[in-house]
Amino acid sequence: MQTFGQQKDSNAWIIQTWAAFIMSISMTGFGIVNLPVDNWVKGFMSMGLVFSVGSTFTLAKTTRDLHESRRLTSRIDEAKVEKLLSQHDPLTLK
């Protein structure tokens, strides 16, 4: 039977993802602040940025949860099949 270990990301990967996130939000925010438009347009674009970031986190969490639930279901099905195979004796007819 296969064992599924906990997936562990490296520290370098974690630092890279956080750095990319912080840089992208900072640079987009800097761009919005320096736009040559009225403040209400900047506010509208800032609200759009905040909504996009929030929905991205929600989508990532939902995708992760779906993947983990499928993985657990797969493990349970695999355990059931392995149990049936271990109990089956091909030389005995029932």
Image: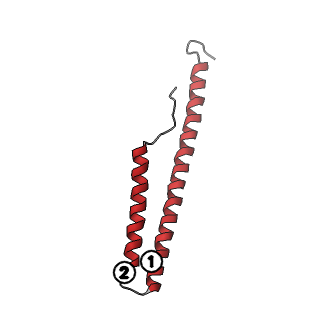
| Amino acid type at image mark 2 | Leu
* Quarter of the image where one finds residue 39: bottom left
Q: Is residue 41 left or right of residue 84?
A: left
Q: Earlier in the sequence, mark 1 or mark 2?
A: 2
In the image, 51 versus 59, the foreground residue is 51
| Residues at circles 1 and 2 in contact by the CB criterion of under 8 Å | yes
| Amino acid type at image mark 1 | Met
Residue in view at x 60 percent, y 13 percent: 92
Classify mark 1: residues with Cα within 10 Å, few (<14), some (14-19) or many (20+).
some
Disc 1 on helix, strand or loop? helix
Using the image, determine if residue 87 lies above or below residue 45. Answer: above
**Which residue ends up furthest to the top in the rendered image?**
91
Q: Position of residue 46 (x, y in %)?
A: 46, 75
Disc 2 on helix, strand or loop? loop
Disc 1: which residue = 45
Q: Position of residue 90 (x, y in %)?
A: 55, 15
Using the image, determine if residue 36 lies above or below residue 65. Answer: below
